[in-house]
Image (tube, coloured by chain):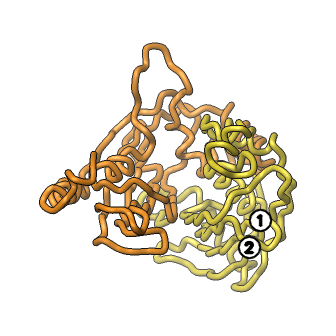
Chain colours: A yellow, B orange
């Protein structure tokens, strides 16, 4: 039986902590791959002529479900496999196009333990291109309270996302 | 639907019809295929997600009691095939949103935010079900976009054992641009 040590536990996390930035150069392949992986066949995510002529934007752009996958990757890169997302809220403000370098950064704005003993971290994450915030994500993520805890074992009433 | 049909009493009746649907599950559907790992790997590859939960079965066994799908993929399992034999029409994801636009005579709409709450993990082989529930419709409000109404729609997902796996909540604003008649 494999044992896996937690990447971090609740005591490691302090309000105000910054998550490492993620920089990624978006290409047309990024956009198309993300759209198809999320089964989003709408043409503005793979057909530049459609995006320009019908949507009035400069190019194809990242779809929302793929952005959710980018935020999830960003969160679990930091929290590790024991990090279990409870709740995420997205606000879309602008589109991300091929040629953009997107930058994700995040801050811890809450650390608490619920009545069931589950440890929770609240994160504010922004996806930026240059100085423009394109999408914000508020996330509530369960992390182990100690080396013996595992948020994934919580079921039913013990899991209060 | 024309603006004239929404004048006065007709508009109130349309609103009352929609308000009567608050809390009522609609558009219950089963996914077209079981949750499968090919899409899990495609999704992880598309965002370079190296979480060992999705790539190392020993880690998945130790941490999550076997493989799971990334929680953020929850809506992926309900996007219909681009084509299927014999299909003539299909419900749109978030059909209630389009119903509201049409019934309330609000030609424009935007989604202002989207929350997803995750419950039981989704696992390869699961066959999920979904239903849409209208939660609220606001009074008429005027924003810089125009005049219209905010609404909240929940999309609930459960697995084949009837366990809740997630709830998505969308806030939409359906409106008519300033200077245009109606609503």
> Residue at left 47%, top 56%?
A155
Count of labels in the image: 2
> Residue at left 55%, top 78%?
A113
Image side of residue B96 versus residue A56, left or right: left
Residue matched to label 1: A78
Percent position (x, y) of residue B158? 41, 44
Q: Quadrant of residue A124?
A: bottom right
Looking at the picture, do discs 1 and 2 lie on one chain? Answer: yes
Few, some or many residues within 10 Å of mark 1 (<14, 14–19, 20+) = few
Of discs 1 and 2, which sits in the foreground? Answer: 2
Q: Residue furthest top?
A: B85
Give the vertical position of B159 relative to A69 (above or below). above
Front residue of B38 and B59: B38
Task: Name the chain under label 1.
Answer: A
Number of the label disc, if any, that sits on residue A106: 2
Measure the alpha-carbon separation of dots 1 and 2: 10 Å
Number of the label disc, if any, that sits on residue A138: none
Which secondary structure lies at badge 1?
helix
> Residue at left 71%, top 70%?
A133
Front residue of B113 and A52: A52
Location of the C terminus of chain B by quadrant is bottom left
Give the vertical position of B45 relative to A9 (above or below). above
Q: Earlier in the sequence, mark 1 or mark 2?
A: 1
Percent position (x, y) of residue A156? 42, 58
Q: Are marks 1 and 2 in contact (CB under 8 Å)?
A: yes
Whether residue B157 is visible to the viewer of this picture, yes or no, is yes
Few, some or many residues within 10 Å of mark 2 (<14, 14–19, 20+) = many
Location of the N terminus of chain B by quadrant is top left
């Amino acid at each position: 039986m494999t044992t896996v040590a937690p990447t971090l536990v609740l005591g490691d996390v302090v309000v105000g902590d910054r998550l490492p930035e993620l920089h990624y150069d978006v290409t047309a392949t990024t956009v198309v791959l993300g759209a198809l992986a999320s089964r989003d066949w709408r043409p503005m995510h793979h057909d530049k002529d459609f995006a320009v002529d019908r949507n009035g934007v400069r190019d194809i752009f990242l779809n929302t479900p793929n952005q959710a996958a980018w935020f999830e990757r960003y969160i679990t890169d930091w929290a590790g496999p024991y990090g279990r997302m409870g709740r995420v809220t997205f606000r879309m403000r602008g589109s991300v196009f091929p040629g953009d370098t997107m930058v994700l950064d995040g801050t811890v704005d809450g650390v608490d333990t619920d009545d069931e003993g589950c440890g929770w971290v609240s994160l504010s994450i922004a996806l930026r291109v240059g100085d423009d915030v394109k999408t914000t994500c508020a996330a509530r993520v369960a992390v182990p309270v100690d080396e013996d805890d595992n948020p994934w074992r919580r079921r039913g009433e013990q899991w209060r996302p | 639907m024309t603006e004239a049909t929404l004048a006065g009493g007709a508009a109130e009746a349309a609103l009352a019809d929609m308000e009567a649907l608050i809390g009522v599950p609609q558009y219950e559907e089963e996914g077209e295929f079981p949750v499968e790992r090919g899409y899990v790997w495609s999704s992880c590859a598309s965002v370079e997600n190296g979480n060992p939960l999705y790539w190392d079965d020993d880690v998945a066994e130790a941490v999550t009691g076997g493989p799971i799908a990334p929680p953020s993929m929850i809506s992926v399992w309900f996007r219909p095939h681009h084509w299927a034999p014999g299909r003539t029409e299909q419900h749109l994801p978030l059909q209630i949103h389009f119903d509201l636009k049409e019934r309330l005579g609000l030609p424009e709409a935007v989604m202002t935010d989207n929350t997803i709450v995750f419950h039981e993990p989704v696992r390869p082989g699961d066959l999920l079900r979904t239903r849409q529930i209208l939660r609220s419709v606001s009074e008429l409000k005027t924003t810089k976009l125009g005049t219209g109404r905010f609404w909240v729609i929940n999309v609930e997902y459960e697995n084949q054992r009837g366990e809740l796996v997630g709830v998505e909540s969308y806030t939409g604003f359906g409106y008519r641009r300033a200077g245009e008649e109606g609503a």
